[in-house]
Image (cartoon, rainbow, N blue to C red):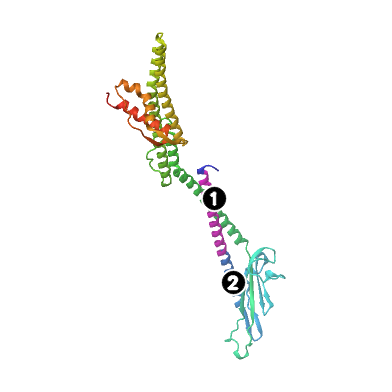
Amino acid sequence: MKSLRGKLMGGTMAIVGVTVALLGVGVGHVVRGTMEGNFDRALSEKGRALASMVEQGEEGLHFDFEPTAFPEFSDARHGAYFEIDVEGQRYAASASLQAGTLGEASGRVTLPDGRRGREVAVPFEAYADPGRRGRSRMPRLVKRGVVRVAQETSGLEGTMAKIDWGIAGSCAAAALAAGAAMMLLVGRTLGPVKKLTEKIAAVSEREPAALGVIGGMPTELEPVVEKLNGLLERLRAAFERERAFTADVAHELRTPVAGLLTTLEVCRSRPRDAAGYERAMDKSLVMLRQMKGMVEGLLLLARADAGKVALRVGDVDVAAVVGRSWEVLEERANARKMRLRVEGEASLRGDAELVGMMMTILLENAVCYAMAG
């Protein structure tokens, strides 16, 4: 998935879904535990009530059980059972149990009729009433036993199933609501990205301009906008330099090209002697050398931009470099009544070609901008 919106939505919905599911499972577990605990406590209350009916007297144990008080134990259809063991022996059981027996496990069990239910075990000591029987004639050992009470849980299971479905539906509704809210939130969050995209799309390839300040931009995107503004400003400056460079090249090449055309046209206008043709050729060579110097300068700039300038360092005769540079400019200097005088000798270590170009630039500036004469 390459969409930023899709990634945000997918990741967020996965987290929300897992969180809501875990919350639903936790709530369901707590509710189920609470209901089962209440169910077991009700069974324990019945077990204690039955245990209180087991009395110990002179003649032994007596179970004072009244079936009308506990009608659920009279018929197996009710799914309720009890069994009383005293000193490890079965002492009494509910009519619903018939020939069956309850296991010794507590919690979830399978009842004698095959249905699912829950069972609790309540230990007790047989009740002895000293007020009604002589203390001296009471048994020395108190009988101990266990009352096991079990009941089917179809009603409990049905209620818990409804609660589980309610929790599941609530979790699903919460997840859908969270998804809808996330869609709105993600849409509003990605709004600045769309605005930034529109700003970038509006930038002209011929006149690149900075995006400027974009309102409502989140902090995370401010560095991106700042870097884009810097890039566009550098592109604009580069385009300006390119246009200025092109204009300068056209201006510089126009003069020697026009001079060369004029010289050739004048030379061709009428027959001349050999000396006249030689002068025309010499003049043309001077202007061609000037053009050659300009072209070499352009090539040097191109190599410098590409980082491919290789220096050829050696001893450079300054007077010779000045002389070669002046040959290109001498005619223009004569037209402005300018002269160059070189005195003395000097040498330096450097690249003769680059030193010559630098000297040509200096002398050309002098010829172009110094006062005539």
Q: Is residue 315 visible?
A: yes
* 264 lies above or below 338: above
* 70 lies above or below 6: below
Q: Name the residue under label 1.
A: 14
Where residue 74 appears, as percent x and y from the top left, is 66, 69
Asked where in the image residue 233 lies, by quadrant, the reply is top left
In the image, what residue type sits under mark 2? Ser
In the image, what residue type sits under mark 1? Ala
Q: Mark 2 points at which residue?
A: 44
Q: Can residue 203 be seen in this view?
A: no
Image: magenta residue range: 6-34
How far, Cα to Cα, is label 2 from label 1? 44 Å
Q: Residue at x 43, y 46 (%)?
A: 220
Kind of element beneath mark 2: helix
Find out whether residue 27 is within the magenta segment: yes
Asked where in the image residue 301 lies, by quadrant, the reply is top left
Q: Nearer the viewer, residue 368 or 319?
A: 319
* 121 lies above or below 235: below
Magenta segment main secondary structure: helix
Number of numbered labels in the structure image = 2
- Quadrant for the C terminus in the image: top left
